[in-house]
Image (tube, helix red, strand yellow):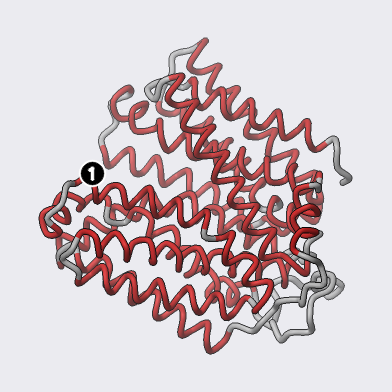
Amino acid sequence: MSFYKNKSLQPAEGILPVQWNFSLAAALVLMAPFDLLASMGMDIYLPVIPHMSEALQTSPEMVQLTLSLYLGVLGTGQFIFGPLSDKIGRKPVLLGGALIFTCASAGLAITGSAPVFLALRLLQSAGAAAMLVATFATVRDVYAQRAESAVIYSLFSSMLAFVPALAPLLGALLDIQFGWRSIFWVLAALGAFAGLHAAWRWPETRVPSLTKPRGKLRSILGSKPFWTYTTGFSAAMGSFFVFFSTAPLLLVNGLGLSSVTFSLCFASIAIVMVVFARFAGFYTQWWGLRGTLRRGMLLIMCGGGLLLLFGGVMQLSVPAFMVAMWVVAAGIALTCSVTANGALKSFGDYAGTATAIYYCIESLIVSIAGTLVVVLLGGNTILPLVVFTITSAFLTLVLTKTISA
C-alpha cells in the first residue's frame, strides 16, 4: 500500500510500466543505504588517520589527500555513470557501483601499501558515484510526479548533509573496539548487503533515450528551471556547509561549549531537517514546486537575518544561534524536497545525465563559494553564514521569477 492515498498521482511522464509497488518506507529501505554509504565513505576514517599513516608507512597528509580525492571522484565520476545509466539502465550501474565499492572497501581493510590504498580509495569513490547517480535517477524515474518524491529527496539531502558529521564518530568507536581496519570491513559488509538486497528487489526504471548526446547537454544547460532549482539546492547545501565549517569555532571556541554539548546542538539541526522532510509530501502538494522553493529560500534568509540581528545588534548566545539555525534548517529541508524534482523533471529519457550535471554543479558551487566565504570572512565569526545564506537565497528568489509555478 502506498504511503499516500491519492490514487490520481501518476508515474512520471514517459516512464515504462515497471513494477515499483513499494510503500514509501520500503522504498527508503531499498534506496537509502546507497545514499548513506556514499556519504559515509567520505570521511568515516578521519579520526584514525594517525594510526593509518603508521600502518601504511606514509604521512598523515598523504592519507588526508584521499579525502579530497574521494570527493573529487564522487562528483566527476557521475559524469561517466550518469550517461551510462541512461544507456544500459539504472540497475546495472547501481549493482556495478555496489560491487566496486564493496571490493575496494575490503581491499582498503587489508592493504599495507600507501599507493595501493590510494588506488583503492579512488575505486571506492567511483563505486560511490555510480551508486549515487543510479539511485537519484531512479527516484526521478519513479517519483517525478508523485508526492513521495518530496519526502525522499528531502530525506536523502538531509543524510548527505548530516552523515559526514556522525561518520567520524562511528569510525572512532570502531577503531577503539576493533582497530581502524574494521572501519573498511564494515563499509564492505554494508555495501555487499545493500547490493544483494537491490539485486533481488530493484526493478529497472530506465526510459530508452531518443535524444542525441549533444542535444541532451544543450537541453539541460539551456533550461531555466534546471538552473533555478540547482541554484536553490546549492544555496541550501552551501548554507549547511558553511555552518559545518564555522560552528566548531563559533560554539566551542567562541561560546565555550563542550564537545558533547556541541554534538547535541549539531544533532538538533538534523532533527529539524528530518522532521520537516517527513512532511514534505504534504506542503509540496499545497504550495507546488516553485512555491515550496520560495518559502525555503525565505526561511534561509530569515535565519541569516536573525544571525545578523543576534550577532551584530545583540549579544550572540547559544540559544539565539540555535534558533536562527533551526530556521535555516527548516528552509534547507523545504528546499531540498523540491529542487531535484524541479531541476530534473523535464529530462525523463536522460535523467542519469541530468542528475550527474545537477550534483556536479551543486558540488562546485558549494565547495568554491562556501570555502571562499569562510576564508575571506573568517571561520570564527557569523559573517560567513550571514553573507552566504542571505546572498544565495536572494539570488535563487530572483531566479524563481523566470520560471512558471
> Is residue 397 at all visible to an observer of this figure?
yes
**328, 371: nearer the viewer:** 371
Identify residue for label 1.
61
The amino acid sitting under disc 1 is: Glu
Q: Is residue 246 left or right of residue 222?
A: left
Residue 365, image x, y percentages: 57, 39
> 10 Å neighbourhood of mark 1: few (<14), some, or many (≥20)?
few
- The location of residue 209, given as percent across then percent down, is 78, 72
Above or below, 288 against 5 in this view is above
Q: In the picture, which quadrant includes the N terminus?
A: bottom right
Q: Is residue 282 visible?
A: no
Q: Left of 326 or right of it: where is 168?
A: left
Q: Quadrant of residue 231?
A: top right
Q: How many numbered marks does the figure carry?
A: 1
Residue located 70% across and 66% down the image: 140
Q: Give the residue drawn at x 46%, y 56%.
A: 73
Q: Is residue 262 above or below residue 27?
A: above
Residue at the top extreme? 313
Q: Position of residue 113 (x, y in %)?
A: 18, 63
Query: For the residue labelled by badge 1, is the local secondary structure a helix, a strand or a loop?
Result: helix
| Residue that appears at 74% across and 63% down | 213
Identify which residue is drawn at 43% across, 65% down: 37
**Position of residue 65 measured from the top left corner of the image (x, y, whole percent):** 31, 47
